[in-house]
Amino acid sequence: MKGEMEMTEDVVIVGAGIAGLATAVALKRVGVRALVLERSQGLRSTGAAISLFPNAWLALDALGVSHKLTRIYDPLCKGYVTNVSTGDVQQVLFPAGQGPRAVHRKALLEALAEELPTDSIRFSSKLAAIESQEQGGGASIAVVHLEDGTVIKSKVLIGCDGLHSIVARWLGLAEPVYSGRSAVRGLAIFPQGYGFKQEVQQFVDEGKKAAFLPLNDREFYWFLTSKEENMTGDPEQIQRQVLEKHAESFPSVYLDVVRHADLSTITWAPLMFRHPWGIIFGNLSKGNITVAGDAMHPMTPDLGQGGGLALEDAVVLGRHIGNSVVKNEGLVVPGDMAKAINDYVKERRWRAAGMVIGSYLSGWVQQGGAKWWMNFLRDGVFYKYVFGWVARRAHYDCGELPAVSSAKED
């Protein structure tokens, strides 16, 4: 039976993924309580694991949670890229102690959720409609209608509801488009350990790219991207398709990792992205309503920056809202929120669009083709020079959150 209830909140965040939880933590640290609405019955862990580069760890530092994860997950020190067709191997070095770390997605979500009051995440909450109500003097509030009849009025609404964001659609942002590629991802488990060092092994072939990297001594995150439009069936069938059809010519070391996959972690998904001009020229906000994470800038995974940018978004948004709270002596003033959100959008727009472009081009180059110049771009230019530059570029610092003396620690 559906109940009807009306609530009032300072901030409502739609989605309890990385962007949503990180934004709620950022706001808590500047003294603002946020209610997080999640359509699932619990924290989602789709994707099994995620790579986090130095920019992501700077954001996690600002959120006060990095120490929970750095003591568990070690940085990668180097990588090897094998051309499956020729057998050529290239080495990629990461700056000492600054390589990416592979992290269980669930561990990241739990580390963020632990920072929040237990009543700040409302599960099984499905968004039905959004409206904006003018309050006079240029101020407005967002009104959220849930499928169970609940109505929530909020001074700020932040859509962190992922690829098919309802909030992004309400803002008028164009739908994400298919990149022409898809990805299979999973975790492999070796109960007795495998003995690999902290290195990423990557394999490239015409129209295909695969890799595996260690999470710890026993678990590996692996993936395969290809131009295959659909891999149907249950996880065991998908695993068989990878082994027998898509990666049959790959080195045995990769096939062994796939054979040790935990079937419950195997997922297949098309790789989607938002056109960069949709981010540059689109309405990323309207008054006190905006988006963050994949709701703003879905991108292909080729630079490993989807999660990192979501964490950056959270800190930057928290910083701008926090500055407004400082100015207004600890209060969330609706009339000031539109400016804070507009400043956030200005700061993030070009950064996000640049990463979407970089990720798409990176995937295009890495998966290559039969033409010699594509292979030269990939092997002679990208892995020798560009990949290391990208790793260094990932040192982007999203800044620190302002100190709010009247912060309400729940």
Image (cartoon, helix red, strand yellow):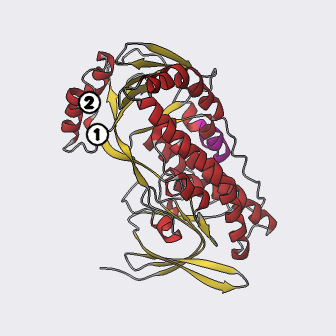
- Residue 260 magenta: no
Q: Amino acid at mark 2?
A: His
What is the x, y in percent for residue 400? 73, 47
Q: Secondary structure at mark 1?
A: loop
Mark 1 surroundings within 10 Å by alpha-carbon count, few (fewer than 14), some (14 through 19), many (20 or more): some
Q: With respect to residue 34, does 162 lie above or below?
A: above
Q: Quadrant of the N terminus?
A: bottom left
Q: Quadrant of the C terminus?
A: bottom right
Question: Of helix, strand and loop, which mostly describes the magenta segment?
Answer: helix
Decide which of 387, 53 is in the foreground and name it: 387
What is the x, y in percent for residue 299? 48, 47
For residue 323, what is the image quadrant?
A: bottom right
- Quick check: 188 left or right of 285? left
* Residue labelled with disc 2: 246
Q: CA distance from mark 2 to mark 1?
A: 9 Å
* Residue labelled with disc 1: 228
Magenta-tinted stretch: 58-67
Q: Are marks 2 and 1 in contact (CB under 8 Å)?
A: yes
* Residue drawn 33% across the image and 80% down it: 2
* Residue drawn 44% across the image and 56% down it: 176
Decide which of 2, 268 is in the foreground and name it: 268
- Quick check: 386 left or right of 363? right
